[in-house]
Amino acid sequence: MTLLKWNLWALTFVVLVSCGGGGGGGGDSSPSNLEDNPEPELPQDLQTGIFTDAPVTGLRYEHGRITGYTDDGEFQYDANSSDPVCFYIGEVRLGCSVVGAIITPFDLSAPGQPAGLQSGYNITRLLNSLDVSDTPEISLSEETRRATGIITFAVSDAVFATDELVVDLVNRYAPEGVLLSREQASNLIADNADVQTAISNLNQVLNESVSGITIRWNGALTGPGVLAHI
């Protein structure tokens, strides 16, 4: 009887050990226990772009973790990044754009807004007014790096000229103490092929938008005022 009991105990022990090992192995190989392996980030691909109205020196720029000041228009960007690049006079943001080799004032926009002709011309007016160089390029003084505040560029020529911060920047940093007119700014960028291409692209977008508008005469409106529905 003693030998029989011993054999039964040994057999039971072997069976229990075998079942325990099998259960543990199955649990480890279950797909629910596998760790997620996210795709690795693309390596940084640094490229040099140009900000041109004429090429500008002294604009601060931010592109993800890349920051600096433009030098003869040049700025650094990561071609593998989807982050926009934003340009500033000191802390005053001019606008942001998708990164690329060439960026002009007519590519910049406020957050959530498209680029526009009016804002582009006003940015051009301000940059050229603050130019302290006597060359075709634009140079901003180091003092402009202390500028702070918010400017809305997508406003009429007259409203922009009376903006308190614009007036203050011109009084402080413009060599002539005067904000250039739109006509003066247009003359300065007339020979810049990159700027003219950006303006042409915006005009094309505007024309396509206007061509999609239908105007219907409303005969019920007989009094003075607008006699059309758009």
Image: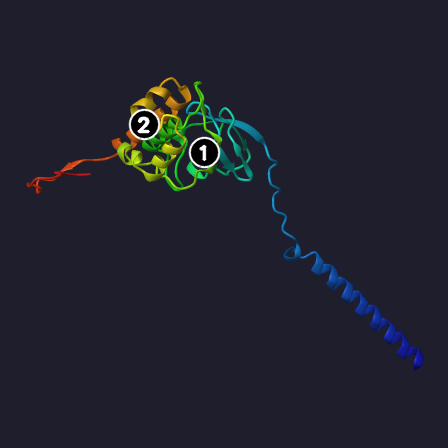
Tell me residue 128's x, y (percent): 39, 26
Q: Is residue 214 visible?
A: yes
**Measured from the top left, where is residue 199 in percent x and y?**
35, 26
Relative side of 68 to 186, left or right? right
Q: Image point 89% across, 74% down: which residue? A: 7
Report the quarter where the C terminus lies. Answer: top left
Which one is earlier in the sequence, the residue at label 1 or at label 2?
1
- Find the distance from the CA under tag 1 to the CA under tag 2: 32 Å
Q: Is residue 98 visible in the rendered structure shown here?
A: no
Q: Give the answer, above or below, for where 34 lies relative to 138.
A: below
Q: Is residue 228 above or below residue 18?
A: above
Q: How is the image coloured?
A: rainbow
Q: Please give the residue where the numbered disc 2 appears in the rendered image.
A: 203
Amino acid under disc 2: Asn
Sort mark 2 into few (<14), some (14-19) or many (20+) by Cα contacts within 10 Å: some
The one nearer the camera, 158 or 33, is 158
User: Disc 1 designates what residue?
Assistant: 144
Instruction: List x then y, in percent, for residue 226.
Output: 13, 39
**Image-based side of 142 in relation to 204, left or right:** right
Q: Quadrant of residue 198?
A: top left
Q: Nearer the viewer, mark 1 or mark 2?
A: 1
Where residue 58 appears, x then y in whole percent?
49, 30
Q: Residue 119 or 167: which is nearer the viewer?
A: 167
Judged from the image, the secondary structure of the residue bearing numbered disc 1 is helix
Whether 188 is drawn above or below 14: the answer is above
Q: Amino acid at mark 1?
A: Thr
Q: Examine the image and state in which quarter residue 181 appears.
A: top left
Q: Nearer the viewer, residue 115 or 127?
A: 127
Q: What number of labels is visible?
A: 2
Give the number of the disc on residue 33: none
Q: Is the residue marked by circle 1 packed among few (<14), some (14-19), or many (20+) residues within 10 Å?
A: many
- Name the image quarter holding residue 218: top left
